[in-house]
Every structure is written in structure tokens, then in C-alpha cells.
Amino acid sequence: MLLQALVPLIGALAAGNTVLLKLSRHSQHCASTLSSLLVQYLDTKAIAVEATGGASMITALMELHWDHVFFTGSCSGINVATNERERESV
């Protein structure tokens, strides 16, 4: 979970993008620790961290306009995300 979250985050921040990092709810202790460390050491204007929520959270996030989405979650989660994006582009 750690590398899946940090590698895309580092690339996105290095490119000058702002990032909303949605961490897995299945590894709560790791997500909580990573969340507190990221907001402590990184610019909170460039990064927001969300460590809770499931499919309903993904659906709500996908209703917003995003220039780019990098998804490293489960197959069921990607189905929710892509269905929302397809519905938006029609």
C-alpha cells in the first residue's frame, strides 16, 4: 500500500500538480500514519489526504472534474470509478 500511494504522489508533486490522495480503508493504521506524516511534512496547499470511505467516496470524487486520475485500488473500485467517468463524458 505504501509504494502504491507514494510513487504516483511523488511524480505528481514533482510535476507541479496538486494531489488528492485517497488511501485504502482496509489498512487503517498505515493510512492513518501516512496521512498524519504527509500533512505534517508536505505543503497542504499541494496535497489533501483522505483515509476513509469506500465505493461511495470514490463515486463522489469521480463526480468532480479531474484532469488526471491515477487509480491503484481494487477491481470493484475501478469499476465504480470508470463507470462514473463514462457517464460524465456522455
Image (cartoon, helix red, strand yellow):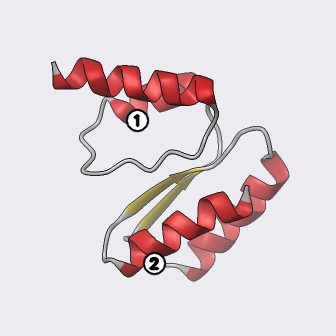
Mark whose residue sits in front, 1 or 2: 1
**Residue 20 visible at all:** yes
The amino acid pointed to by label 2 is Asp
Q: Residue farthest to the right?
A: 29
Q: Residue farthest to the front?
A: 75
Which of the pair 84/54 is nearer the observer? 84
**Which residue is at a point 45% across and 73% down the rendered structure image?**
11
Where does residue 21 sit, x and y in percent of width and height? 52, 55
Label 1 element class? helix
Where does residue 72 sit, x and y in percent of width and height? 58, 46
**Which residue is at a point 31% across and 77% down the rendered structure image?**
16
Q: Alpha-carbon neighbours of circle 1 within 10 Å: few (<14), some, or many (≥20)?
A: some
The amino acid pointed to by label 1 is Leu
Using residue 72 as the reference point, say whether residue 15 is left or right of it.
left
On-image quarter of the C terminus? top left
Where does residue 89 sit, x and y in percent of width and height? 18, 25
Residue, disc 2: 43
In the image, residue 88 above or below residue 26: above
Q: Alpha-carbon neighbours of circle 2 within 10 Å: few (<14), some, or many (≥20)?
A: few
**Residue 54 visible at all:** no
> In terms of image quadrants, where is residue 15?
bottom left
Using residue 13 as the reference point, say whether residue 27 is left or right of it.
right
Using residue 10 as the reference point, say whether residue 73 is left or right of it.
right
> In terms of image quadrants, where is residue 63?
top left
Using residue 25 as the reference point, say whether residue 80 is left or right of it.
left
**Which residue is at a point 84% across and 53% down the rendered structure image?**
29
**Which residue is at a point 79% across and 46% down the rendered structure image?**
28
Q: How far apart are labels 1 and 2 at the CA level?
A: 21 Å
- State which tag comes first along the sequence, 1 or 2: 2
In the image, residue 64 above or below residue 3: above
On-image quarter of the N terminus? bottom right
Residue, disc 1: 61
